Image: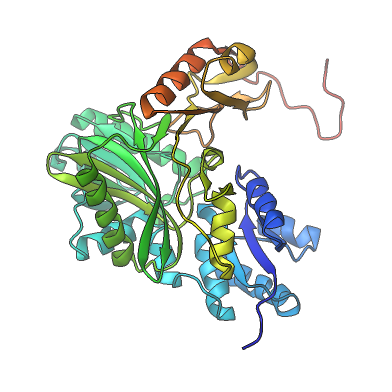
């Protein structure tokens, strides 16, 4: 059997938080990388780059990537985040490389297909009904069970996910989601909106790795801030979980069943579940690793990062340990307090001085617009912590956030015609 090349293909986007971490991990693992970037077709054609492909046209993009990989074979094709999961599965399947089946990758990407497969598998999930996105919500508002959640089928990071408690709330939420989809270039007559019953309870996130369908739990995160709506902005993640061992085991078993129902068999999974007196409920299961910069707090074996673990697993390298370091760690995805223009952030040294805080990174750009959920697609930044106990980690994150001061000015509407391209802007 021929030896696999020490090379991997990474599928990413220009704005991904994760690319740098995967590139650094590949270097540590002794792997060469080929990076394919999601690029709209007109730009890709203009640039004439074989590494710029349009992920929204997966079959055409797979043709282009396979043409490159025919000359430069790889041992694995890996998506850096959600946008590349289906394309990675298509390319790997064509090349005979280990990967999830494309239909399974699609099921983990499309919330309607996910719900249908989880329902068929007997998983505990919210009751759901799909509606055409172009529908007038006033015609169905009185039919909904309240409280309910309105959500898109493809957007990531809680974008467009809105709770409604009354028919009036429902109409407003549905119309707001319609505007979000239109702003994203989605034709309403080709889109679906999911309406689900709201599941009360505490929320957790499970980071895992599948090998031949068997799940190894890498980390189980508590989310101590309540996520009850009307929007569902995530803030604090802390691991190890403080839930009882039996509850943690039930969460892991439920996640493995969910992955099996979707058809996922290999690679990283990131699951969101709610837990109440009836046990764990599956909210979402993605066929990729944790988003943002959250993975930087995870360390395995003798210092392996999550990205290095994923890469070594994908190319078949031996992994001495999948066990996480025993101390408690956490991250806060800094919420955007309001819309406007970020002028500056003060208090970073004071936040970093909090015992247990290992770093503060502001990822939003100065003098650039901030857009909160449900329209927004990014965070203001991240705070990282490490301590002896989960309680100490959570307390450190909250205190560090309290010391930060965000100066945000209102965004001024454009009252004059835009300056022509190439012309000088006024000072």
Q: Quadrant of the C terminus?
A: top right
Give the answer, above or below, for where 79 lies relative to 240: below
Q: Nearer the viewer, residue 128 or 42?
A: 128
Q: Hey, which quadrant is residue 33 in on the image?
A: bottom right
- Tell me if 304 is positioned left or right of 36 in this view: left
In the displayed orientation, state which residue is furthest to the bottom.
1
Q: Percent from the top left, x then y, of residue 411?
A: 59, 17
Q: Is residue 382 left or right of residue 168?
A: right
Front residue of this view, candidates 116 and 85: 85
| Front residue (pair 123, 136) | 123
**Position of 296 compared to 187: left or right?**
right
Figure label count: 0
Residue 218: where, in percent of width, then height? 42, 50
Q: Is residue 132 above or below residue 408?
A: below
- Residue at point 64%, 75% (across, down): 63
Residue 323: image x %, image y %? Answer: 45, 51
Residue situated in front as seen by the camera: 379 or 189: 379
Residue 255, picture quadrant: bottom left
Q: Quadrant of the N terminus?
A: bottom right
């Amino acid at each position: 059997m021929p030896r696999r090349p020490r090379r991997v293909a990474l599928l990413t986007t220009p704005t991904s938080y994760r690319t740098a971490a995967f590139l650094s991990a590949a270097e540590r693992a002794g792997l060469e990388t080929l990076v394919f970037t999601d690029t709209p077709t007109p730009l890709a054609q203009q640039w004439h780059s074989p590494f710029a492909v349009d992920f929204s046209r997966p079959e055409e993009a797979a043709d282009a990537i396979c043409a490159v990989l025919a000359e430069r074979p790889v041992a694995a094709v890996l998506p850096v985040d959600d946008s590349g999961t289906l394309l990675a599965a298509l390319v790997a399947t064509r090349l005979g490389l280990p990967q999830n089946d494309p239909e399974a990758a699609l099921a983990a990407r499309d919330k309607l297909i996910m719900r249908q497969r989880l329902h068929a598998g007997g998983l505990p999930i919210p009751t759901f009904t799909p509606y055409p996105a172009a529908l007038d919500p006033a015609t169905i508002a009185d039919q909904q069970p309240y409280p309910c959640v309105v959500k898109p089928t493809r957007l990531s990071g809680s974008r467009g996910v809105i709770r409604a408690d009354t028919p009036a709330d429902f109409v407003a939420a549905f119309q707001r989601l319609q505007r979000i989809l239109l702003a994203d270039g989605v034709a309403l007559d080709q889109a679906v909106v999911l309406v689900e019953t709201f599941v009360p309870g505490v929320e957790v996130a499970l980071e895992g790795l599948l090998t031949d369908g068997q799940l190894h739990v890498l980390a189980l995160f508590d989310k101590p801030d309540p996520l009850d709506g009307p929007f569902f902005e995530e803030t604090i993640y802390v691991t190890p979980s403080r839930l009882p061992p039996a509850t943690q085991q039930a969460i892991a078993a439920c996640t493995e069943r969910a992955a099996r129902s979707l058809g996922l068999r290999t690679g990283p999974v990131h699951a969101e579940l709610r837990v109440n007196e009836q046990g764990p409920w599956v909210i979402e299961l993605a066929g990729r690793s944790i988003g943002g910069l959250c993975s930087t707090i995870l360390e395995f074996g003798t210092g392996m990062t999550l990205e290095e673990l994923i890469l070594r697993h994908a190319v078949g390298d031996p992994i001495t340990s999948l066990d996480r370091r025993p101390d408690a760690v956490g991250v806060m995805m800094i919420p955007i307090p309001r819309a406007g223009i970020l002028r500056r952030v003060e208090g970073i040294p004071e936040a970093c001085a909090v015992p247990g805080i290992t770093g503060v990174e502001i990822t939003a750009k100065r003098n650039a617009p901030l857009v909160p959920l449900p329209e927004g697609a990014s965070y203001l930044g991240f705070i990282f912590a490490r301590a002896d106990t989960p309680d100490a980690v959570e307390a450190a994150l909250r205190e560090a956030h309290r010391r930060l001061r965000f100066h945000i000015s209102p965004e001024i509407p454009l009252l004059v015609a835009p300056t022509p391209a190439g012309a000088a802007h006024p000072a």
